[in-house]
Image (cartoon, rainbow, N blue to C red):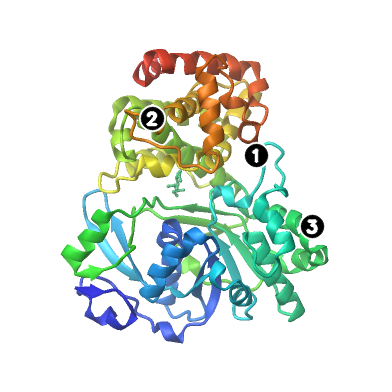
Amino acid sequence: MVKLNANNLSLLPEKVRIPSYNRSDLKTGIVHIGTGNFYRGHEAYYTDEILSRNNPDWGICGVGILEADSRMYNVLKSQDGLYTMMVRESDGVLTTRIIGSLVENRLGPEDPLATIEKMADPEVRIISLTITEGGYNFDANTRSFIMSAPDVQWDLYHPDHPKTVFGYLTQAFKRRRDKGLPGITLLSCDNIQHNGDTCRRMLMAFLKEAEPGLIRWTDDQVTFPNGMVDRITPATTQADIDLLRDQYQIEDAWPVACEPFIQWVIEDEFSNGRPPWESAGVQFVSDVGPYEKMKIRLLNAGHSLLGLLGSLMEYGNIYEAVMDPQLENILRKFMDDEVTPLLGEMEGIDLKMYKESLIQRFANPYLKDQLSRICSDSSAKIPKFLLPTITEQLANGGTIMIGTLIVAAWCHYSERAGTPGYTYEIEDGMRDMLRQGAIDSASGDPLAFVRIDAIFGNLAHSDRFVETYIPLINSLRDNGIEFVIRQVLKP
Ligand code: CS2
């Protein structure tokens, strides 16, 4: 058995690819906030790829800023930033590779000033983020920054030990400006349409209160490219850890398993240079808008459909859900009738093939992407993945039947979750509100759930939405999910 760390790399079995570059020769050109599984299977992999092609300026410092990040931090620290990426093909082939691009790791709460200094280091030219859809702290209803959020308020009064990414960035930018350093790129890698623009707007709103003198410098020196990121990366399971130990003799406390498909499309707006990621397959374009919209509205919303409807049918993972012919059909119908009309022509993209490839990816039997992962944080996901589709379809006079069914299924899920007889839970920052809305909805106030305006805005004021929603939620309760799907699929 070989514990994964820098000293032991040469002891690993030959079938495991290890970094070909000398990690101690690398500079740290990127600070990344949020080193979760998705990040480790995506940007960190692309960067590992270009490091092995002799680009030593682009090592990464991984940063966790939440207390909850301490587990990942401790694992990475004990493994010198190394971890195993396990790529699972749909025919069962498994490829393992040790990723070495995370050359440094820090935990913000452990030493906030050192973390800020690192972000202000002259060698660092990119700060990238995977802070989740909810991490940008914007109100889906008003589309503005939530200044009253307790952590944001804390950051205004405790600049030297911030809690939010905005507090960290403000202090880092201040130091960069004072040192006279050239600009930096803030690269958002979260599933939000116009993620770079959103990041800029939210940061600027924070700066206005916290440090107005920095607004001009940020405007002049910082770029915020929009980007579309894609790779399905389930939560790591004990089975993944055991497999590495039993079949590869590797002791890795937190490997990352993912699908073979990977995509990253970025607007080429880097203020102070960037790695040649294109040599690893990243696409640089002038406008990423159409790609983001297509991916988020089809893949991510498709995931939510399978996650919420699939959980009501007691499935456990995406593969099981999409193998159910009823769910596959309703997913196809949703993509064709409710999303495709909103996408328009995209140069170089065959939408039909793209949708087909999504079904194939979801049907990878070796991936077993947990529905619990998909349904977690729905309050941050649904407003980005699904509600814009419903709103645009309402405005265009298009059908909203399946989109509305996903919302009704979410209400029914929230009502049942955690109660005897059901295996799923609500894992969501807005859990109590969701639960209460769902309970009230079941006890005589059917619209209670969709009146949570921080999520749904004024959707419950739309007559057509309400007329579609009420029969669906009632029928889900009275007749069950299979019956409702059959009704919706009836020609
Ligand atoms: C998923 C995404 O979290 C979710 O609900 O849809 O994590 C999805 O797997 C990735 O965006 C794939 O690129």
Residue density around tag 2, few if under 14, some if 14–19, many if 20 or more, within 10 Å: few
Which residue position holds label 2?
Answer: 419
Nearer the observer, disc 2 or disc 3? 2
Query: From the viewer's perspective, is residue 82 above or below residue 206?
Result: below
Q: Earlier in the sequence, mark 2 or mark 3?
A: 3
In the structure shown, which secondary structural element does the residue marked by tag 1 occupy?
Answer: loop
Q: Which residue is located at x 54 percent, y 47 percent?
A: 291
Residue type beneath disc 1: Ala
First in residue order: circle 2 vs circle 1: 1
Q: Is residue 410 left or right of residue 479?
A: right
Identify the residue under disc 1: 140
Q: Residue at x 38, y 13 (%)?
A: 479
Write down the quadrant of residue 140 in the picture: top right
Between the C-alphas of marks 2 and 3, the distance is 43 Å
Marks 1 & 3, CB-CB < 8 Å contact: no
Label disc, if present, on residue 209 of the rendered structure: 3
Point out the frontmost of discs 2 and 1: 2
State yes or no: Cβ of the residue under disc 2 lies below 8 Å from any atom of ligand 1.
no
Q: Nearer the viewer, residue 184 or 238?
A: 238
Residue drawn at x 54%, y 43% as measured from the top left: 429
**Alpha carbon of mark 2 to alpha carbon of mark 1: how far?**
29 Å
Mark 3 Cα shell of 10 Å, populated few (<14), some (14-19), many (≥20)? few
> Is residue 68 shown above or below 352?
below
